[in-house]
Image (cartoon, coloured by chain):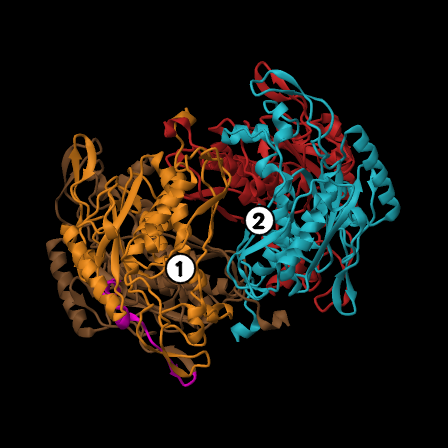
Chain colours: A brown, B orange, C cyan, D red
Amino acid sequence: VGVVIDGCPAGVAICEEDIARELRRRRPGGNCYVSPRQEEDAPRLLSGVFEGATTGAPVAIWIENRDADSTPYDAVRHLLKPGHAQFTYLAKYGVFDHRGGGRASARETAARVAAGAVAKALLASWKIACWAYLFSVGEVICGRGELGKEYPLFCPDSRARQEVEALLDSLRAEGDSIGGIVEGRARVGAGLGEPIYGKVEALLAGAMLSLPASKGFEIGAGFGAARMRGSVHNDPFVSDGGAIRSGKNDAGGTLGGITTGEEIVFRVAFKPPSSIQQTQQSVDLSGAPATYAPPQGRHDPCVAIRAVPVVEAMTALTLADLALRSRLSHLPDTETS
Amino acid sequence: VGVVIDGCPAGVAICEEDIARELRRRRPGGNCYVSPRQEEDAPRLLSGVFEGATTGAPVAIWIENRDADSTPYDAVRHLLKPGHAQFTYLAKYGVFDHRGGGRASARETAARVAAGAVAKALLASWKIACWAYLFSVGEVICGRGELGKEYPLFCPDSRARQEVEALLDSLRAEGDSIGGIVEGRARVGAGLGEPIYGKVEALLAGAMLSLPASKGFEIGAGFGAARMRGSVHNDPFVSDGGAIRSGKNDAGGTLGGITTGEEIVFRVAFKPPSSIQQTQQSVDLSGAPATYAPPQGRHDPCVAIRAVPVVEAMTALTLADLALRSRLSHLPDTETS
Amino acid sequence: VGVVIDGCPAGVAICEEDIARELRRRRPGGNCYVSPRQEEDAPRLLSGVFEGATTGAPVAIWIENRDADSTPYDAVRHLLKPGHAQFTYLAKYGVFDHRGGGRASARETAARVAAGAVAKALLASWKIACWAYLFSVGEVICGRGELGKEYPLFCPDSRARQEVEALLDSLRAEGDSIGGIVEGRARVGAGLGEPIYGKVEALLAGAMLSLPASKGFEIGAGFGAARMRGSVHNDPFVSDGGAIRSGKNDAGGTLGGITTGEEIVFRVAFKPPSSIQQTQQSVDLSGAPATYAPPQGRHDPCVAIRAVPVVEAMTALTLADLALRSRLSHLPDTETS
Amino acid sequence: VGVVIDGCPAGVAICEEDIARELRRRRPGGNCYVSPRQEEDAPRLLSGVFEGATTGAPVAIWIENRDADSTPYDAVRHLLKPGHAQFTYLAKYGVFDHRGGGRASARETAARVAAGAVAKALLASWKIACWAYLFSVGEVICGRGELGKEYPLFCPDSRARQEVEALLDSLRAEGDSIGGIVEGRARVGAGLGEPIYGKVEALLAGAMLSLPASKGFEIGAGFGAARMRGSVHNDPFVSDGGAIRSGKNDAGGTLGGITTGEEIVFRVAFKPPSSIQQTQQSVDLSGAPATYAPPQGRHDPCVAIRAVPVVEAMTALTLADLALRSRLSHLPDTETS
């Protein structure tokens, strides 16, 4: 997997270890509750960084993947795997790949996390921070994560974590999987975002729904707002020692697509992984009914957990893009005088 | 308001009346339950259409707006209107506009609907159809709309419609507003969509969250999928007279970001309109606390209703873009032989 | 004709008269040597400007064209006009337009000049200036123009101007036309331009070859450099009171695609206008040989003259784009500290 | 050096050897007249190709460069090398690189040639062909090359080649260099190109001026057209067995920016390489005058020779882009009926 980050300014401090550290957070073998495949996510900076800082040239990162044995899939190579993208890739490109999954594989999220590490370094120079944590797994609510804190399983609440662990154990025993929700947050000043098609929430929604297995996005009160009255939902403006603030944050940090200065808060829904250890109904490539018996192997029972650092990375990339663009939105006084 | 549609192929049949008809559907005065401002949405085709069909040149449409009296706002011209984008525009551009709202105004959606009319004409040549309807207003569930049917208030279920009407009447009496959800659908063959960042759901989510007042997007089982097990959520592939189909549609019509050939189904959450006829807490431009007493006038109590044709238009624009792009995804046999 | 300028920062001072003034410079009836059609180039600012300055929203400009009588062309409506784009438009879009010319018409350059007026206003805030003048008409060399000076026929040398006028008179009598070269210049600091595909000369070349009737572009020593030796062509670096300058400017103001701080100097070749008052060999739409007898009317004998303000406008647009992008190339010290 | 080609359709036959073969053509050590550095241009296809054909995924190619010893430059590491981009890169990015050259190095053209090999494979499926050859070196005119023929030094005329070889020998003895011109051609049907900013000649000009050391571009009669009369320059349309052709080709294969079906013909001027083996006047980084004594080494005395396959590659990339876009310009009859 590789990624090229174009448009990163010169002078951003970054090194391979910064990227490796982020990659380790999403690594399947990172803890005993996520998929134990031992992928070597050692990133190589191929270009764009010189003596510990970006040069203004595109930053190219290459992540070698040594461990991808597709032989287990040989037995089911002519069957469509339920919930997977083989069928749609076949319809689109006329190519059928019976192996793990190509560009629809969650492996590609390593590239996003690597790019996100660069974006985070850039955002740091503007004191913009973003983070994410597990909001829920199935019916279990996981609490609210704080900036800068690392939680086992990305679950802030320790009691909820025990419930999640028990749930994952039983799912693994049953060969089943479960969905979950990731919550993302960012601290950023007022005035970021572009009107119409470049709204903060539009870019975040597009970024999050581009993640494998994501099925929904909401900001602030989100779908809950659809049941609220305006008199309840409207955030009053209040005076906070002279500064203009919002009295509450049902808007989730934006108005008209531009940041208010309150925390950006959003949630992303992930479906249960479609790779489960149960026989399922399917068809073969000729369209004839068949029974899909999955090859032995171990998979994530809950993709939402691994998705936490990916959501964080996509948030960083989206905000870095907007922060750069915002430098073009008006002429600084020094330039007009 | 104007819009320029670039990239529309030559030979698509379209005339001003096609556009006007779509614009009338979103017109505030179109029925007695939405805002009665009598805007003249007469569209003018400025370029790109000759003798009833597109020429390949950009299609420019101009919609004159004759009625926009901003005098009522003079009394509150130094106050921040809660829930509005004046504050964030001021932060971004250094310009404060006490009037209706500029690019954050719902007026801009007229341009989207006009462009959507052209996109629909293009999609028709590929037999792709999309439609939308009201899914809920507050707690009222509105049923499921069929392709090609027009419902008063865009509400498919007549009993629910009575409830919605009663709710809107009481909100109008209280000077309050309510949120709602719009459901969109599309019929399209398998193979549409681009991997990674151009996934169908990513482009739809970005398009929908770019709409004024939208707060959430979900596709298929959406946020519900976050509570489901894989064994329940996975749609089995079945044989339908030789054709490969899905036994159910929790995926919402896409796998790996590419259409399966099943109906695309998604929902968009809209917040309650922030323009309400109640006094609210706010601040003036200096940051001092103030009471915002809204000027007399009548506003939509539920923006989700007017949003239905806009959701439909954005769906058409998104799918037209993807359908054009899909013509580039592989070489037709005639070209390689 | 209309144009929408996206990406212009807020706070740039501009009004309709600034645009109208530039448009008058390219107006065919502006002097007796260019085409006397009396087009009303009155520009209307439709959006993006409020109280004399840009707001950050797209700047839309509409220029009404009242005078475009296509009846003279009725007699030759089934013949291909030599040197015109009707044939290629027919091949591309399947549409044949016997009238003036659509998007291949020189009328579209009005939109470029209008947009260029906005770009010039933006460049002024960074003290970047660009200008253009007539370099040659046929064999006549026209001298070198200075920044801020207006010359009749855009020809800096008055003696050369008399020759050009005599040449144009005789061409008009013969119903013939002539080619010419426009030279453009810009004063801009060092460091503008992007590596690889965004080089200053690449963007300028692309912009200039997008102009109707242009056939060539060269920067600095240009085609002459192809006959020079390195020992002659290399510009030595010299010390100018501590500042690093070039001892001469055969490079034309760029090295590696990025400005050196010396003046940018380039030339654009324009072919003789293909609309001439002489009978010419052609074919009709069925491919049968035919004689093209042009309808009476008066056309520019030399499009290079009218092209001068258009070259200037395209230079301004290209540099404004690069100047904006250059604000993203490295982090200012104030942001990293 | 690496390159990622996005937007290549699935089903294009390509393998590493196709790319390697093109790379060998531009290799400095490919013949005794160009720079003898032995770079290993072995390309690795990292993604996008499966079993000998593209999959629709981005095609990533990585070319390892084993030989780049920068020690010779240590002695002059604080001096500005005349004619090189170190100074402008310093101005732009605030980074000074005393070594070979980074993104302004001619090494980057390997990536273009590799990408061009893929573009050529794609063009072949539409029967579009492009080629290039040496048009002149200094004052020596090299003749006209035919499609599919390989000439030593890319020089079609064998007598001229002897002159060029003698010239290069004497330049090498003097430590000097010389400029040259490359001519490119393409055979392509009518109707390729986009109006206004996507004209064939605009995209070619932008592509060619993005090449290191290029200083000019002209199409058809080019700068010569600036001295011609319309009655001479206009290409008459003629009937060729029913087909509409041009009687001559001063237009160079386009009208209004769209191909006529005649051969595209253009020329690109290259300056003499600035790396010469002579002492030159310069300054050090503090701006103080200094004498630049180049490190021993051998360089190309004429970059235009090596540029031939690069011009060919850029032509292929430009036409492939336009050929893909042209599939979107109008609806095929099969789609509208």
- Dot 1 falls on a residue whose secondary structure is helix
Image-quadrant location for residue B37: bottom left
**Residue at (79, 58) in percent of width and height:** C247
- Residue type, mark 1 in image: Ala
Q: Which residues are magenta?
A: A223-242
Q: Is residue D176 above or below residue A301?
A: above
Front residue (pair D202, B117): B117
Q: Nearer the viewer, mark 1 or mark 2?
A: 2
Residue found farthest to the bottom: A241
**Residue with the mark numbered 2:** C197
Residue A151 screen position, x and y as percent: 26, 71
- Dot 2 falls on a residue whose secondary structure is helix
Residue A247 screen position, x and y as percent: 33, 78
Residue D145 screen position, x and y as percent: 65, 27
Determine the chain carrying the residue at label 2.
C
Whether residue A224 is in magenta: the answer is: yes
Determine the chain carrying the residue at label 1.
A
Residue found farthest to the right: C159
Q: Is residue C108 above or below residue A183?
A: above
**Residue with the mark numbered 1:** A114
Whether residue A3 is in magenta: the answer is: no
